[in-house]
Image: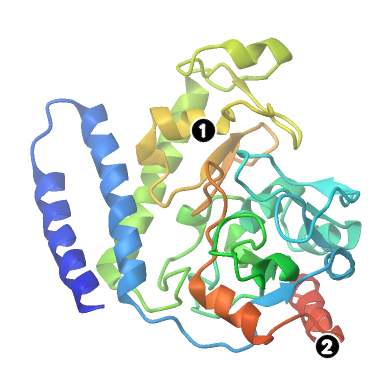
Amino acid sequence: MPAFRTFASSMLAVVGILLSAQSTRADQHDMMEGWLWGILWQYMETEQPPAADPRYPVFLSDIESQRQLGLLEANYGPYRGEPELPNKCFYYGDGGNLISVSDDFLDAYVSRGFSKETMCMGLLSGIRFNPETGQRLATVVMVDLKEVQSPDYFGEPGPITEEIPVELPGCFHRGLPLVDCRFAHHPITGAPMKPADTDRIAEAGAKALAAGRKLIAEGKYSRPCAAGDAARPLEDESCYTTGSEGVRGYLPWEYRVNALHPQMVPLGGFYRFDPAFSEGFAYAIMADGAAGPSASMDSVNLVLSGKNRATSASLNALIVAARDR
């Protein structure tokens, strides 16, 4: 840990120097700023000890438990091609979670001001704590126990997902958490953040909002994508994807924003453009669909210990956390 802190301090110094340096091109500066902020965020995460809460994550090792909860993940864990739940979230890369939820699960979020799309953005975000209050959120991990318990398992993606939040902060209801939430706590560790970092996230969120509005004003992402649009070059931003499937086997259209406008995604994640959103777009944070999930060793060890496996009582507690807000 001291080595991480030393490296983090060095990175902070480098960030300050590079971000204060004069750039000859605004787009190069924006790209560097987005990249450096992503690096800084990772090392803020490693520096801070996680807040303890023995209840979470809850491990769901069978499809029946997922159906009882009303949230099913169809890419990892014990999933073996069973029918998905009626409300599908977005495909955002072959390595991402393929989440579907029940009508009851969705209705509870709609009653809180979410739409299906903004709820999905929250469920796909890699958060474990409420960034405003530091409260531990109810999270689940889907796990194939037989594979994880095998002596040949070394943490590769497939048998176990990363933590998936089933309890979302209200400030995620528009799908614009960087401007609607005050990030006073780290969403991975729950640790209090320095006021300067809170302000910096707010500034990054405001820049992302302005940039998204500018794209819409310029006529970008103005029509639904058709089948033939998959062959268009990366720089083509004329259309937006609809539905949950996107374009299978192809770089999702959402990643065009990440590639062309990295300053818009300071905490990782991806965008969806759609007139149904209040601003015409929304985003997930800390979500990467380009590679399979990497379960932490803490999660793997917790699975192997036999603790936190789903019981009737823990499933009922999850249902309350997800729906009775």
- Please state the total of marks drawn on the protein image: 2
Q: Residue at x 68, y 26 (%)?
A: 247
Question: Label 1: few (<14), some or many (≥20) within 10 Å?
Answer: many
Q: Secondary structure at mark 2?
A: helix
In depth, the one of 135 and 158 nearer the eye is: 158
Q: Is residue 266 left or right of residue 17?
A: right
Way the structure is coloured: rainbow
Which amino acid, mark 1?
Tyr
Q: Quadrant of the N terminus?
A: bottom left
Residue found 34% across the figure and 73% down from its top:
193
Which numbered circle lies on residue 255? 1
Q: Quadrant of the C terminus?
A: bottom right
Q: Is residue 122 left or right of residue 64?
A: left
**Which image quadrant is residue 64 in?**
bottom right
Residue 108 falls in image quadrant: bottom right
Q: Position of residue 71 (x, y in %)?
A: 80, 61
* Residue labelled with disc 2: 313
Amino acid under disc 2: Ala
The percent coordinates of residue 105 (x first, y second) are 83, 62
Is 230 positioned to the left or the right of 311 in the image?
A: left
Task: Characterize the local packing of mark 2: few (<14), some (14-19) or many (20 or more) Cα atoms within 10 angstroms.
Answer: few
Residue at disc 1, secondary structure: helix
Residue 57 sits in quarter: bottom right
Is residue 179 visible from the viewing direction of this image? yes
Q: Give the percent coordinates (x, y) of residue 106.
A: 82, 57
Give the residue drawn at x 47%, y 68%.
187
